[in-house]
Image (tube, grey):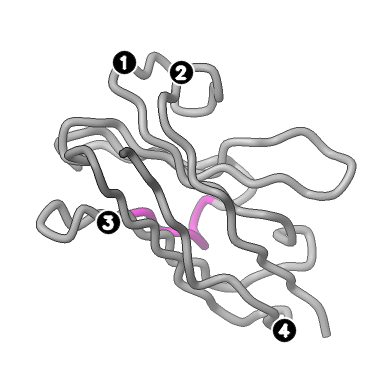
Amino acid sequence: QVQLVESGGGLVQPGGSLRLSCRGSGFTMAHYALAWFRQAPGKEREGVSGINSSGGKTSYADSVKGRFTISKDDAKNTVYLQMNSLKPEDTGVYYCAAGAQVLTYYSPSDYDYWGQGTQVTVSS
């Protein structure tokens, strides 16, 4: 059974940091492109960051560039999202996704597997 399980969300003040983790089971994440998406209340799901299967190429949405870092540990079947200098507009449910044939990192339809999401709230 394929599963992606996110963790690490929570409440943080503006300017703070969080590290999200997403552990996969039932499949080998090293063979997949991986990405983080987020969805704020009343808004569509948007791509935040992606990493290719080899880990040699990463991509970031303009809104998070320079503040977020995606990485993965194939031995742990886990992908991470380090989020620094958080802003209130970063608030939302964050989802990880894995896709075998990803053409664009930020197209949700390219992904085969999704986690259940973890809430990130940035507020003072």
Residue on which disc 2 sits: 110
Q: Earlier in the sequence, mark 2 or mark 1?
A: 1
User: What's the amino acid at mark 4?
Assistant: Gln
Distance Cα–Cα, label 4 vs label 2: 33 Å
Instruction: Give coordinates of residue 74: x percent, y percent.
Output: 14, 51
Distance Cα–Cα, label 2 vs label 1: 7 Å
Look at the numbered disc 4 and give the secondary structure of its residue.
loop
Residue on which disc 4 sits: 13
Residue on which disc 3 sits: 78
Q: Quadrant of the N terminus?
A: top left
Tell me, for residue 16, which label it has, or none.
none
Distance Cα–Cα, label 3 vs label 2: 19 Å
The one nearer the camera, 68 or 9, is 9
Q: Pointer 2 and pointer 1: residues touching (CB < 8 Å)?
A: yes
Q: Earlier in the sequence, mark 3 or mark 4?
A: 4
Residue on which disc 1 sits: 101
Distance Cα–Cα, label 4 vs label 1: 37 Å
